[in-house]
Image: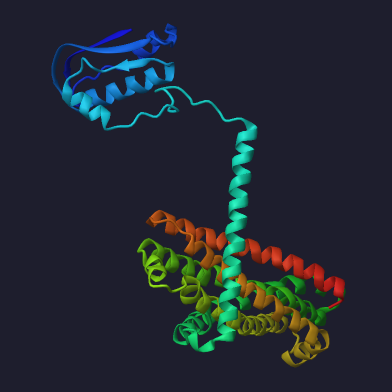
Amino acid sequence: MHVTLSGAWRLRGRVPRIDKVQRALGAVRGGRDARLVLETGSLDAWDSSLVVFVLALRELAAHRGLTCDLSALPEGVRTLVDEVPSGPAAAAPGEVPPRKLFTTRLGERTHLLMSEVHAHMHFFGECVQALVRVVVRPRSFRWAEGFEQMRRCGSAALPIVGLISALVGVIMAFVAALQLRQFGADIFVADLVGLVVFREMGPMMAAIVLTGRTGAAFAAELGNMVLGEEVDALETFGVRPVDFLVAPRLLALLLMMPFLALYADFLGVLGGAFVAQGVLDIVPAAYFAELQTAIGLSDIGTGLIKSVVFGGIVAYSGCFRGMRAGRSSVAVGDATTGAVVMGILLIIIADAVFTVIFSTLGW
């Protein structure tokens, strides 16, 4: 099949459509000698519009199994076209590429899942080794950086953690007050708020707040370091990036989360006391006396155990996504979003597992 190109080819002018050639090739079958020959008639001035049209014809011919002959074209056109590699699997213009088989897509998804699991296991092992090296050789740890991360994770997070925890305590006490008042059991609002705050909501709310605040910051910081090739520079100098960057952040959250959980527990209970006095006319002395009878050391201990694990999850999620971020600004944003989503998901799963374990043990 021969296609003649003639006239002026300008981007500002009227460029022919490829539909006619595509319909004409519909009846042509590919074979050993089947060719699509591009010829030039009275070809005038041309620009990149001609090159784009020739590239589209070349891809169309490759899709139909034809050999595209460009020998009659001007040398400048051939040179520009040769600079663009032709993909044999590219779809023809205007055509939808064939859909992959279900087994192919299943295999690709399985491969991606196994790669993700392997990456998590490898990074988790590196984090454990880094913490062990801190215990064995504490002098090699960057204590200045560790204390700075503790300040950022601890005292700098007190306002937002305190506000959220107090509001959660107010909401729980108000909802409980509306129900308990119907049965004349107003005083038991202290039991409900205390148990829920110390065992569940205090550690969880502190962890979720830190996931959006600190975990996202970790992912953004480390992602920018990957983008700026600072992590590669550390590896070039023989420094382990996990020891230098991840260990201070991980240790800071592991140590600060129990204190933040206790702080969240205190403000949550305080918010409940405010509602109890304002709505149920329960004096603070009676409220806290009932709270002491309902809350034991096991309730406080379960919350502290959860808080340590939640702190490790927040730090792990932020550092994992940050260290695996791509080398672009968009990839850094994706890593930050992924750290928040991953952290909240793992916190919910861990809390469910702890609830089942503690219920089984009778704690």
Looking at the image, the residue that sits furthest to the bottom is 285
Q: How is the image coloured?
A: rainbow
Q: Residue at x 51, y 62 (%)?
A: 321
User: Is 30 placed left or right of 110 in the picture?
Assistant: left
Picture layout, residue 243 above or below residue 41 = below
Residue positioned most to the left: 45
Q: Quadrant of the C terminus?
A: bottom right
- Residue 170 in view of the camera: no
Spot occupied by residue 26 in the image (x, y as percentages of width and height): 43, 10
Seen at 26% across and 29% down, the residue is 82
Q: Position of residue 248 (x, y in %)?
A: 50, 79
* Count of numbered labels shown in the rendering: 0
Q: Residue 239 lies in what quarter of the image?
A: bottom left
Q: Is residue 106 above or below residue 267?
A: above
x 86%, y 71%: residue? 360
The percent position of residue 259, horizontal first and vertical second, equals 62, 85
Q: Quadrant of the N terminus?
A: top left
Identify the image quadrant of residue 186.
bottom right
**Residue in the image at 43% along x and 6% along y:** 27
In the figure, is residue 165 to the left or right of 282? Answer: left
Point out residue 213 in the picture as x, y percentages from the top left corner: 51, 70
Q: In this picture, is 342 found above or below 156?
A: above
**Of the pair 132 and 267, the residue shown nearer to us:** 132
Does the image show residue 356?
Answer: yes
Q: Is residue 281 left or right of residue 244?
A: right
Front-most of residues 16 and 273 = 16
